[in-house]
Image: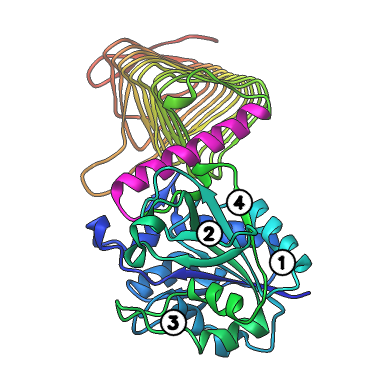
Amino acid sequence: MKITSIILAAGQGTRMKSDLPKVLHPVCGKPMVWHALQAARVVTEETPVMIIGHGADQVREAIGDAAHYVVQAERLGTGHAVQQAESTLKGGTDLVLVSSADMPLLRGETFAEMIRLQKENDGPMTILTIVADDPRGFGRIVRDEDGDVKAIVEEAQATDAEKAIRELNVGAYCFDAEWLWEALARIPLSPKGEYYLTDTVGLAVEAGLRVKALTLDDMVEAIGINSRIHLSEAEAGMRSRVNRGHMSRGITLIDPASTYIGMDVEIGQDTVIQPNTFLRGETIIGAGCEIGPNTIITDCKIGERCEILSSVLEKAVLEDDVDMGPFARLRKGAYLSKGVHMGNFGEVKDSHLGEGVKVGHFSYIGNTTIGAETNIGAGTITCNYDGKNKHHTEIGEAVFIGSDTMLVAPLVIGDRARTGAGSVVTKNIKEDTLVVGMPARAIRKLKE
């Protein structure tokens, strides 16, 4: 049986008060429409059809070829939106799953259960409902005396008695495709001048056909986003879901409520995440690490048994057994080999630090390669920029750079060389040589 997903993403979202299309506002670091696509992929291998309108070009750019796009030029309601996909899908699918891009917490597992129910249903559709005290503007589910679904009444058209109904329409549907296309043409125009997809329920009931309903147990899954307040609620719900998933896989979160982990982040077993830590982008963290507190890591690869305290890392790589912080910063292109130690207020950019390197506090390392077991004293600066170009510094193995040394690139420092405290090095240093002064000069060989 061929199943295709239609994702409704054409709305303007005026209550968001934003120049960004509503469906592109992020939830846990990903546009809310991305979450809708991920859920659809759980139940179908077919490329979803996305109905776009407001900000169509921005949505296309953000999502790329993950969807087939159909533009709803006139936004005349949800029924009209689904109808725009008819020419694309008619005759080519058996079941149609319809969901909204502004409901990012709906899970693929829920969609799978809806599809299972519809396959067992001799009627044309299955809907998703929730029982809640706060209606949040959702339509009300009206049932007959036998408990069968009779209608969905939009809040704007509901009577006082209907507004008191606690069972709500979540806004996800599974249709028999052939019946859907015929029914869409018969949806009446609402008093607001729109064609509501919810009216398909009434059309089915009028024809004596059964409408099944799947009722959600988790209200969080039914959070729809129409305002920044709703966006914050969805963010909290998704963050809680992500964090519970990591904890179930053997990661300790000391305070999940203050821990922010992006959708693509991978964390190894027995790693401990301290409070107020942000793990973002395509970050991978190995086993047995301790991260935080007060740490931000974005698009980094971190090995095992690393300790990162109150630091900021971006597009960096750490091998095993690295420790750094507090208040250290790794910028793009930083590579710290096994066993590197980096003190507080240190910064590294576009540099490779060999095994066992120690970088003292208040140091800046940029455009530099450092050999194994070298010690970089506190306050060391690689002066890599001359106002026009960046220049490279090469530091050998087992070198000792004295505190407050200025290394003026381009520069090559040989193995086991040393600089005195406060040196300003402007010329290459041969191996096993001690230099001191401003500008630094060689005063003796350290090894014959």
Dot 2 crowding, Cα within 10 Å, few <14, some 14–19, many 20+: many
Image quadrant where one finds the C terminus: top right
Say whether marks 1 and 4 touch (CB < 8 Å). no
Query: Could you tell me the amino acid type at mark 2?
Result: Ala
Residue 302: x and y in percent read 57, 31
Report if residue 245 lies within the magenta region.
yes
Residue 26: x and y in percent read 40, 51
Say whether marks 3 and 1 touch (CB < 8 Å). no
Residue 134: x and y in percent read 39, 45
- In this rendering, position of residue 368 left or right of residue 301: left
Query: Could you tell me the amino acid type at mark 1?
Result: Gln
Q: Mark 3 or mark 1, which has the lower sequence index?
A: 3
Q: Main secondary structure of the magenta part?
A: helix
Q: Determine the CA span between mark 2 and mark 1.
A: 20 Å
Report if residue 428 lies within the magenta region.
no
Label 4 residue SS = strand
Q: What label sits on residue 80 in the rendered view?
A: 3
Dot 3 crowding, Cα within 10 Å, few <14, some 14–19, many 20+: some
Query: Could you tell me the amino acid type at mark 4?
Result: Thr
Q: Mark 3 or mark 2, which has the lower sequence index?
A: 2
Q: Which residues are magenta?
A: 226-248
Which label lies toward us, 2 or 1?
Answer: 1
Q: What label sits on residue 215 in the rendered view?
A: 4
Q: Determine the CA span between mark 3 and mark 1.
A: 23 Å
Which label lies toward us, 4 or 3?
Answer: 4
Q: What label sits on residue 36 in the rendered view?
A: 2
353 up-or-down from 65: above or below: above
Q: Tell me the quarter of the picture where residue 330 sits.
A: top left
Q: Nearer the viewer, residue 370 or 49?
A: 49
The residue to which callout 1 is attached is 118
